Image (cartoon, rainbow, N blue to C red):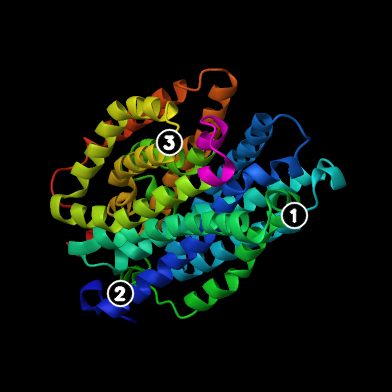
């Protein structure tokens, strides 16, 4: 896979490269989502004991704080990926994520070290946010560059497959602990530390997978020509940057609403027990995971723009009715069906968002151009979605959140309408 172009790669070489480029997503998002999946059990350990909603609100605030470092990570890792290679950036991001997980796993609780406990938790989440901000841009860029133009959407879908697999792995660990290994009291007391430790150990496997990872031919060509890059070059592509921001705003709110927040919504608002809420969320994510490459393949046939418009339109008009029906649902199967329907709607964005953004920028600033505006927008919209939902609930106006999600989807719709009609491609494809 040394100097071959995407068209010259065999299917095995392409799959191997895409797997190596995206495998870290599984570990990184496992570490990231373990926090959310186990928040119901460990929130009391890091904060003074109060009512359950207040504890969840505090843990959600820390979840949002972690997103503050994602733009920094997008900037730093984007520069590394564009100057020194995608491989180096991906390796650094995995190391930072696992350092944060190890810190959370080993941190004593509030009753032992007082205010130092939430301080350590915040610092660990900042490190993890730095990592996650850098991983996305490098992974999205690498996958786009090693894929054939005619099926780039299909392969792009696997970025969210590994992302969702990380979340599913976090939920699988939780379900295994809930139903097989430990009691609820044991998980609350100490068992919640185990998945954070597993995430740190997983770094060894990812480093092994990536040690022989080859750079894409697109990056090698730019590196050999010593083309100029950096933030000032990225800012020359203002329209592309604004397009990333507009597309991401609605997509990231929908994604975090129907993946991260749904588990807590089912348990905290609809009255499902913790085990049921976890099982419903996990089952809907399995369907969502399978759908990603299928939606991506559809975009290879009909184009990226129609899928993004469909997401924006359905999201803007359908979110309030869907959330209204869901809020009245007490059936596990009904909740599963509605959440799955919402995730299918979101798939119009999630399955192709990485490749759409990669196709907006030239090679010399592609990783930075994808990562930085994406990370800023995710921090402002995705990272705060759960907190805003819980804040509306605490204020007694939980239904307002659905209108907020709809408004964000409208932004994505308006942005998608500005995209050019017809197929898109990387500049070097032309």
On the question of residue 175 being in view, the answer is yes
Res 253 → quadrant: top left
Question: Would you place residue 368 above or below residue 381 in this image?
Answer: below
Question: Would you place residue 210 above or below residue 278 in this image?
Answer: below
Q: Is residue 324 left or right of residue 166?
A: left
Q: Is 76 in front, or is 158? A: 158
Name the residue: 34% across, 70% down: 225
Name the residue: 32% across, 73% down: 15
Mark 3 surroundings within 10 Å by alpha-carbon count, few (fewer than 14), some (14 through 19), many (20 or more): few
How far is mark 2 from mark 1, CA to CA? 42 Å
On residue 331, the disc is 3
The image position of residue 268, as x and y in percent, is 57, 32
The image position of residue 207, as x and y in percent, is 54, 74
Q: Is 336 in front, or is 424? A: 336
- Highlighted range, magenta: 265-277
On the question of residue 4 being in view, the answer is no
Whether residue 266 appears in magenta in the rendering, the answer is yes
Whether residue 186 appears in magenta in the rendering, the answer is no
Question: Which residue has dot 2 on it?
Answer: 14
On residue 168, the disc is none
Q: Nearer the viewer, mark 2 or mark 1?
A: 1
Question: Which residue has dot 1 on it?
Answer: 190
Disc 2 secondary structure class: helix
């Amino acid at each position: 896979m040394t100097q071959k172009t995407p068209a010259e790669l065999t299917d095995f070489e392409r799959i191997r490269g895409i797997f190596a480029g995206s495998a870290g997503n599984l570990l990184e998002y496992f570490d990231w989502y373990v926090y959310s999946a186990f928040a119901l059990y460990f929130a009391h350990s890091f904060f003074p004991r109060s009512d359950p909603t207040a504890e969840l609100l505090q843990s959600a605030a820390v979840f949002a704080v972690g997103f503050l470092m994602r733009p920094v990570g997008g900037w730093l890792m984007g520069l590394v990926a564009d100057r020194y290679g995608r491989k180096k950036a991906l390796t650094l991001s995995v190391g930072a994520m696992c350092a944060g997980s190890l810190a959370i796993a080993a941190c004593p609780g509030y009753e032992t070290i007082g205010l130092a406990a939430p301080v350590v938790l915040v610092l660990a989440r900042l490190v993890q946010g730095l990592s996650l901000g850098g991983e996305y841009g490098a992974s999205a860029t690498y996958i786009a560059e090693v894929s054939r133009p005619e099926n780039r959407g299909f392969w792009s879908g696997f970025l969210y497959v590994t992302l969702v697999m990380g979340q599913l792995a976090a939920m699988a660990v939780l379900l295994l602990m809930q139903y097989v290994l430990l009691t609820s009291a044991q998980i609350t007391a100490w068992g919640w530390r185990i998945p954070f430790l597993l995430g740190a150990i997983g770094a060894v496997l990812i480093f092994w997978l990536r040690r022989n990872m080859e750079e894409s031919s697109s990056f090698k060509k730019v590196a050999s020509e010593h083309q100029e890059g950096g933030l000032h070059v990225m800012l020359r592509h203002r329209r592309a940057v604004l397009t990333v921001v507009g597309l991401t705003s609605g997509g990231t709110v929908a994604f975090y609403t129907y993946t991260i927040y749904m588990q807590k919504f089912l348990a905290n608002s609809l009255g499902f027990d913790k085990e049921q809420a976890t099982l419903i969320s996990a089952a809907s994510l399995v369907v969502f995971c399978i759908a990603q490459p299928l939606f991506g393949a559809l975009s290879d046939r009909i184009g990226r723009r129609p899928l993004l418009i469909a997401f924006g339109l359905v999201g803007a008009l359908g979110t309030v009715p869907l959330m209204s029906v869901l809020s009245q649902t007490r059936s596990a199967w009904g909740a599963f069906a509605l959440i799955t329907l919402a995730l299918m709607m979101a798939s119009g964005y999630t399955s192709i968002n990485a490749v759409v953004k990669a196709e907006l920028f030239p090679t010399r600033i592609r990783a930075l151009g994808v990562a930085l505006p994406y990370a800023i927008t995710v921090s402002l919209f995705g990272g705060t979605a759960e907190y805003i939902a819980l804040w509306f609930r605490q204020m007694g106006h939980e239904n307002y959140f659905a209108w907020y999600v709809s408004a964000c989807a409208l932004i994505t719709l308006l942005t998608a309408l500005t995209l050019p009609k017809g197929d898109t491609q990387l500049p070097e494809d032309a």
